[in-house]
Amino acid sequence: MDMKVKVPFSTLWQEFKTFAFKGNMVDLAVGVIIGAAFGRVVSSLVDHVLMPLLAAAGAGGKGYEDWSVTIRGSEVKYGLFIGAIINFLLIAAVIFVIIVKLLGTVVKRAVPPAPSEPTQKECPLCLSTIPIKARKCSHCTADLPEGDAPISAPAPA
């Protein structure tokens, strides 16, 4: 049996808009874009500043891209690998400081709202819910004590 389900394009579009423009989805997209840009900045710092300084200090002017070893005709470019490791360590360190330490401090300093005072209590005789300031239960008409005194039952009629 051929069962085709037709979904109108407008319904599909509405569902997509609801999904795509949720607050957390937009936040995620912004985070990914900023993260990618930050990654490019750190890569540029490693590629154009740190690694050339490291190469000038130890390789006799040879660029780190040229740091390599040839083993049986295959070239192993360990300079590029070292650059990638430094790149990763810098990004991980910055993310650790910003996300873990900075946001952790902000979250710790945020004071949780004080619990509100209760507005209702339970009648010990009939177990119905009554206002906390009530002196008489509106359900069973028992006299409620001030504090922890026992509750007197209503007089028989």
Image (spheres, rainbow, N blue to C red):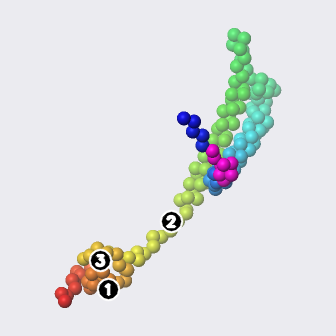
Measured as percent of width and height from the top left, residue 47 is found at 76, 34
Q: State the predominant SS element of the stretch in magenta.
A: helix
User: In screen coordinates, is 100 left or right of 114?
Assistant: right
Quadrant assignment, res 73: top right
Q: Look at 59% across and 55% down and name the residue there.
A: 103
Q: Front-most of 27 and 100?
A: 27
Residue furthest front as drawn: 1
Please tell me which of labels 1 and 3 falls first in the chain. 3
Range of the magenta residues? 6-14
Q: Which of the two marks, 1 or 2, is nearer to us in this view?
A: 1
Measured as percent of width and height from the top left, residue 17 is found at 67, 52
Local crowd at mark 3 within 10 Å, few (<14), some, or many (≥20)? many
Determine if the magenta segment contains residue 34: no
Residue furthest right as drawn: 61
Question: Where does label 3 land, which residue?
Answer: 123
Q: Look at 75% across and 42% down and name the residue there.
A: 41
Tell how many labels: 3
Q: Which mark is drawn over residue 112?
A: 2
Q: Looking at the figure, which quarter contains the C terminus?
A: bottom left
Please tell me which of labels 1 and 2 falls first in the chain. 2
Q: Secondary structure at mark 1?
A: loop
Q: Front-most of 104 and 4?
A: 4
Q: Amino acid at mark 3?
A: Cys
Q: Look at 79% across and 30% down and name the residue there.
A: 56
Q: Which mark is drawn over residue 135?
A: 1
